[in-house]
Amino acid sequence: MVRMSRPRIYPAILREHFELHRQMAFVSGPRQVGKTWVCKSIAEAYFNWDNTDDRRTLLRGPAALAQILGVDRLRTNPPIIVLDEMHKYAKWKTLLKGFFDTYGERARLLVTGSSRLDIFRRGGDSLMGRYLLYRMHPWSVGECVRTELPDKEIQPPAKISAADWNALWEHGGFPEPFLRRQARFTRRWQSLRLAQLSREDLREAAAVRELGTIEVLMQLLAERSGQQLVYSNLAPELQASVDSVKRWIDLLARMHYGFLVRPWFANVAKSLRKEPKWFLRDWSSVADPGCRAETLAACHLLKAVDTWTDLGFGSFELRYLRDKQKREVDFLVVRDRKPWFLVEVKVGEQALSPALAHFQRQIQAPHAFQMVMDLPFEPADCFKTRRPTIVPARTLLSQLP
């Protein structure tokens, strides 16, 4: 990875974690999102399971690791230690539990790895209560304009530079293509990332006989970002059962290839209840401008709800709305099980969608926005209005993490 030339928000988040909590910090997220760079930037020591010398040290157990780190020395603050790619070790949970229970007051553990960490983390509960999870996302408008730790959910609007906005749109938010801003490099990077996901991560997480079919499913999903998924339609295309298709899509979501947004139906008359919408993690690989705009918005909103939840501001979800009359709003952000704000995404300025007012009345959401990608930045707080309002994407997204 190229060396990052500008700060991110996640070092501040992780430093606050170790100031306030004794638990280990687990950092999960998509491949090449910058987890290792961020974690190494705040740590005193770094051990990578893929490094043979580090592996020999880790296999000697917690006591040997503690001796090398000098945890018995007097320090103002306990050292922060990064353990990278630990899920590849069959007994990784036993090692972490042993080190934390014995030396947790004298050293702080920061555990990270590829997207597979989130899959392996779910197996068993031996680490329950011993860690807090932080989900890392690609760069966003909000992270372009501020990197300090937020003290509340919504921030004042701040203007993103034209160069950063264009880079996000054309190259996505993953650090290497976002910072390099070269079309040829971005295309090669996208191909390499897809190959690593399908040939490495997928081979470890799926049965060999399923690999070819799942790779075909990945191609189908790449063409359908922002669309509703009807499993019964996908199954014949793949010559597989509906249950298998659901299981494979759940696996691809856990590998951070994409994610699902499910419908919200509480207090919605004749609501759609079953079909989720699928979005790729890398919006720059979506060709259609309308689908790319909706995918960019989905990734920004997912980052916001994950960050707010991880920082303890509440329990947040990302949903969408659709009824049997085919009225639809692209996104709904839910806070503590209560609708908070609606977002309809448009590329060019259009008349206000009547679906916004319709659904806002039904679910009593305080805010409803029609977010337009092409509008110039306005230094006005979107969240001061309660009626359905057309807002610039550069303004609304700047108020999110």
Image: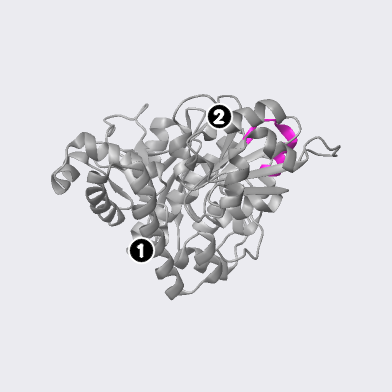
> For numbered disc 2, what is the local secondary structure?
helix
Q: Is residue 384 visible?
A: no
x%, y% of residue 298?
43, 49
**Residue name at image x 70 percent, y 31 percent:** 21
* Quadrant location of the N terminus in the rendered image: bottom right
Q: In the picture shown, does residue 13 fall above or below 193?
A: above
Residue placed under numbered mark 1 in the picture: 289
**Residue extent of the magenta highlight:** 14-24
Query: Where is residue 358, by image quadrant?
Result: top left
Q: Is residue 17 magenta?
A: yes
- What's the residue type where badge 1 is placed? Pro
Q: Is residue 258 visible?
A: yes
The answer to whether residue 235 is left or right of residue 364 is: left
x%, y% of residue 66?
72, 37
x%, y% of residue 194?
37, 58
The answer to whether residue 396 is left or right of residue 47 is: left
The answer to whether residue 113 is left or right of residue 370 is: right
> What's the CA distance linking mark 2 and mark 1?
48 Å
Q: Nearer the viewer, mark 2 or mark 1?
A: 2
> For numbered disc 1, what is the local secondary structure?
helix
Q: Is residue 22 magenta?
A: yes
Name the main secondary structure of what is drawn in magenta.
helix
Residue placed under numbered mark 2 in the picture: 94
